[in-house]
Image (tube, grey):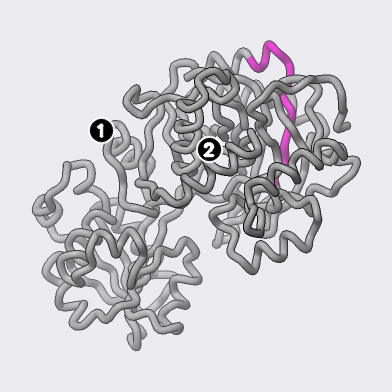
Amino acid sequence: MEILPLEAIVYNQNKVDLNDVIAPPYDVIDEKYLDELYERSKYNIARLILTKGSNRYEDAKKYFEDWKNEEILIKTQKPAIFYIIQKYKNEKGKLIERKGFIARNKIEDFATKKILPHEFTMGGPKEDRFKLISATKAFFSQIFMVYDDKTFSVEKVAQKYLEKEPYMDVEDDLNVRNIVYLIDDEDDIRIIENTLSDKTLLIADGHHRYETSMKYAKEHPENKYAQYVMSYFTNASDENLVIYPTHRIVEKETPNLLEKISKYYEIETLKDKEAFLDKIEEENQKQITTGLILKGDNNFYILKLKSGVKETINAPKVLQNLDLTVLHELILKKELNFTQEELMAQDGIKYEKRESVAFNSIKQGANAVFIMAYPKMKDIIAISKEGLRMPQKSTYFYPKLLSGIVINPLEPANYGEHNNE
């Protein structure tokens, strides 16, 4: 895979506080939170990625140009790779330090198998992002890519930079600390480029943004900058790369659900929530296992798939091995009569990343909640390599990547004009 440093635009830290101007990706910002971000600063990146009003895209273009003219946004002195460490504590209090870097990669068609998707996308978000890119001539968010390097070459290059003062150090609203180091030494950049030159990339998050960049590249073949997209790259061999599940909240009526489930799963009843969560992960290492909680029921149910059941599903073997495939095909579609269109549109069902929200939804009127096990990277890679896709919202790569750390312009940038020291 061809990797290049970023000819980057960043916030001028002499004029703004990064804590006031960064934001999560556009697709996790609801209307209330968007108002909060707007109030936080007139230069918050949300005003670019989710501009309000009827003339959204042209207004975003004007903001972008104005901020550059005011030197709120400035150019780095030379092309660089942004090495980033994201520190946070998981729900059990363990400190996680996910490491990766932001750079550009050559846009490749999926047919080349150099870049592998793993989830389905929808048309609406892609059209929205395309209009924004076309108006502003810039990418404001990264694609989340995963590569595998058991030699940890990039991490070794970055080690000496960790002894320096960070280029950026900002904590987001979820208490994730984002520490950024600028790698601009040409020899170090070359090592990183060479490390990824023979790697296949898996899109962990940002499928809509990647497919949008593909469309833009094809429509602007004369623009060499448009043939690359800004991505974040993290190493699959690093234990700090944790993939979280997305749970299923069923809102429609579910009569005799346990009886229906018993056709396919062995059912074990537990009384303790923590034991329930631990048991899901423990059993899922041996066989497909899912958790279930029901409205008006104080029990926690462990669902262990019976032998020979997954083979009855009309799907390739790698998809039969996926807990969500089994749940969608046998329980949601076959027993609860959801259509594929309803599942895609989340009609009568919701997909929820936050475990606490999933549990609380029973008190809010949901009829059933399926608590999914943590996805396995080996399953994601196996499915992607066969050119297949997982069900919508199968995985949740946390923490999200902040918008506002770096902007990738799709036109030449002149360097040495500004310094962010």
Residue at the spot x=23%, y=46% of the render?
319
Whether residue 237 is visible here, answered yes or no, is no
For the record, the magenta segment spans 178-189
Instruction: Categorize mark 1 by other alpha carbons within 10 Å: few (<14), some (14-19), many (20+).
Output: few
First in sequence: mark 2 vs mark 1:
2
Is 218 in front, or is 277? 218
**Residue 229 at what x, y percent from top left?**
55, 29
What residue is rendered at 14% in x and 65% in y? 264
- Across and down, in percent, residue 186 comes to 70, 13
The residue under label 1 is 386
Where is residue 305 shown, x and y percent of the image? 19, 60
Residue receiving disc 2: 143
User: Is residue 412 positioned above or below 295 on the image?
Assistant: above
Badge 1 element: loop
Q: Residue at x 81, y 36 (%)?
A: 68
Query: Is residue 179 on the magenta stretch?
Result: yes
Furthest toward the bottom, the residue is: 296
Q: Is residue 154 magenta?
A: no
